[in-house]
Image (tube, rainbow, N blue to C red):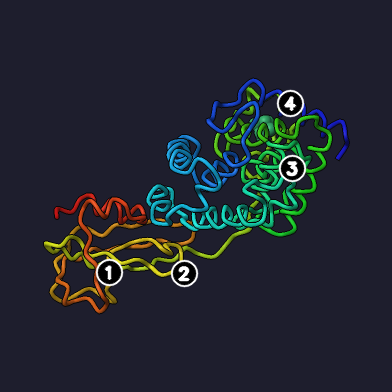
Amino acid sequence: MPVNLLNSFRISIEDFYRSHKRTMPWRKHNPVPYEVWLSEVILQQTRVAQGIPYFNKILQAFPTIEDLANANEDHLLSLWTGLGYYNRARNLQKGAQQVMKNHNGELPKSSGDLIKIAGIGPYTAAAISSICHGEKIGVVDGNVFRVLSRFFGISTPVNTSGGLKEFQLLANEIVHLSNSSADYNQGIMEFGALHCTPKKPLCMMCELADICTAYNTGKVDVLPVKKKTVKRTTEEIHFAVVVDKAGLAMRKRDTEGIWAGLYEFPRLEKPPLNGLPAAEQIVHKLSHKDLRCHFWKVTENEINEPITYYTKHEIRKLGMPIIIAKYVEKIEF
Ligand code: SF4
């Protein structure tokens, strides 16, 4: 790409950031690496407005990396309830323990060292090192793919290893022209989130419209390109809702799968013959499949596993998938 085009793009993005950046608790004059790390992990699958209260309460409970490393896992997961993708929380804690053990409680500065920490991928490593230490490395996430592919007219599918490489190289090339990789990287993400949005981007008011390839070739709606992935599937789950004077029966899942380490109702292999439906079925949508959850009121005789009962007070301290947490709220016991 011609350097002057890269530069015009970069300058517009940095200007956009300086005049439109949203206030966020981790955006500070001197950003704290732990806070940037926590915010990036929360925002990976969550919108900013939804993520901020979680950021605040997790930081309040665990103000330092050391506190997070020593946190009780159930306590951490209970604060994470509602954010989903609980492996993020578990990896965050694993990463904190690694930082305590190998780096004296301080996150390393370079993206090359950060990426060795559990749960920190290329995107988060680039975000922390560029925002906190000015490393000239480009961040590449969904917003960045979209803005770069539209502006430069790149139709390589973004969800392929070739696409990822091409966009990362371009992002690095641009950030090398900048005097503030923190402003440029945060700027392109902010520009993608607020202006060059997936649907109805604000092309009519865009400072880049004159030189934007997608806008000038009528391709705004077709970029970025994504390679088709496998079809969604549906999984039926039958939960046993057993209420006793000792409380509500819950079980902790083992360490595999999306809800690893979280608490849920005991499961039934199939609908029980004598079970009363406790409520309508609820469909929980994941990125790749739907979980159709059925809740059955049964007695403990229907269950083939050891049961532990928890009181309402005890249950509030358990980490649960959001669908279970919401359901528990509705049960009288
Ligand atoms: S003109 Fe439209 S597509 Fe191009 S950068 Fe601006 S908002 Fe995005």
Front one among 273 and 307:
307
Residue type of the residue flagged with mark 1:
Pro
Q: Could you tell which of marks 3 and 1 lies nearer the N-terminus?
A: 3
Q: Which residue is mark 1?
A: 266
Nearer the observer: mark 3 or 4; the answer is: 3
Q: Which residue is mark 2?
A: 256
Q: Could you tell which of marks 3 and 4 lies nearer the N-terminus?
A: 4
The image shows residue 228 at horizontal and vertical percentages of 59, 60
The image shows residue 221 at horizontal and vertical percentages of 61, 41
Ligand 1 located in image quadrant: top right
Residue 138 marker: 3
Q: CA distance from mark 3 to mark 4?
A: 16 Å
| Element class at badge 3 | loop
Residue type of the residue flagged with mark 4:
Ser
Residue type of the residue flagged with mark 3:
Gly
Q: Could you tell which of marks 1 and 2 lies nearer the N-terminus?
A: 2
- The residue positioned 40% from the left and 47% from the top of the image is 79
Query: Mark 3 near mark 2, Cβ–Cβ under 8 Å?
Result: no
Query: What crowding class fits label 4: few (fewer than 14 Cα within 10 Å), some (14-19), or many (20 or more)?
Result: some
- The residue positioned 27% from the left and 73% from the top of the image is 268
The answer to which image quadrant residue 73 occupies is bottom left
The answer to which image quadrant residue 185 occupies is top right
Asked if residue 230 lies left or right of residue 203, the reply is left
Query: What crowding class fits label 1: few (fewer than 14 Cα within 10 Å), some (14-19), or many (20 or more)?
Result: many
Q: CA distance from mark 3 to mark 1?
A: 45 Å
Q: Classify the position of the C terminus by image quarter.
A: bottom left
Say above or below: 56 vs 81: above
Say above or below: 223 vs 205: below
